[in-house]
Amino acid sequence: EVEVEQAEAEAEAMSEDDVEEVAPPPQSSAAAAPSLAGGDVQISAASGLLPEHLPHQRALCPLHPFHAAERPVAAPVDGNEAACPNCYCFACDAPVSACRHWRGGDPAHCNAHGDSALWRQKRVNAKRQRTRAARAARDPLGLG
């Protein structure tokens, strides 16, 4: 009761024009995290959500182990074709369900990962193709 009366007295003493200085909050680990190349987003911490509930590259899936190949190959490597509903194709930057080359092709996209310079280049090329296609759809005659 004494504490409540004291807090009320302090609140009354402070008028609406008074300003109370407070220390800034400590910098979060997310704010201190280094930026990623290519504009990718990295989530460093979350509360209430598990990593498998968030979209992620197949190579970073918390539910299915990934086995990196030294170079792109045409067939899946050691179960890399397994994916959860939130896995994205690294090469296509699309959900696994939308990747036409997931289980096979030249090369199989289920083996794609960001540690490979060849896969990173394939990702850049795929993004350029998507950008060109989107521009062509907006301006089919190329007048724009």
Image (cartoon, rainbow, N blue to C red):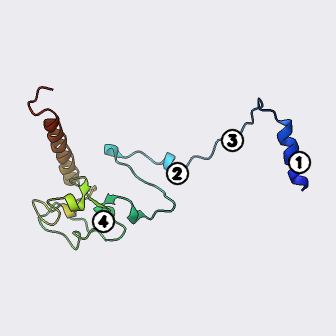
Residue sitting nearer the eye, 69 or 130: 130
Q: Amino acid at mark 4?
A: Pro
Q: Quadrant of residue 96?
A: bottom left
Tag 4–tag 1 contact (CB < 8 Å): no
- Residue named by callout 3: 23
Secondary structure of the residue carrying numbered label 4: loop
Q: CA distance from mark 2 to mark 4?
A: 28 Å
Q: Earlier in the sequence, mark 4 or mark 3?
A: 3
Say which element carries label 2.
helix
Image location of residue 54, percent across then percent down? 38, 60
Give the alpha-carbon distance from disc 1 to disc 2, as whole Å: 37 Å
Q: Which mark is residue 29?
A: 2
N-terminal label among 2 and 3: 3
| Mark 3 crowd level (few <14, some 14–19, many ≥20, 10 Å Cα) | few
The residue shown at (11%, 26%) is 143
- Above or below — where is 75 with respect to 134? below
Viewer can see residue 70? no
Question: Of the residues under marks 2 and 4, which one precedes in the sequence?
Answer: 2
Q: The disc labelled 2 sits on which kind of residue?
A: Ser
Label 2, label 3: how far apart the Cα atoms are: 18 Å
Residue farthest right in this picture? 2
User: Which of the two labelled residues, at mark 4 and mark 1, occupies the earlier sequence position?
Assistant: 1
Q: Please determine whether, in this image, residue 28 is positioned above or below residue 85.
A: above
Give the mark nearest the N terminus, 1 or 2: 1
In the drawing, what numbered circle is on residue 85?
Answer: 4
Give the labeled residue for mark 1.
Answer: 6
- Give the percent coordinates (x, y) of residue 71: 17, 60
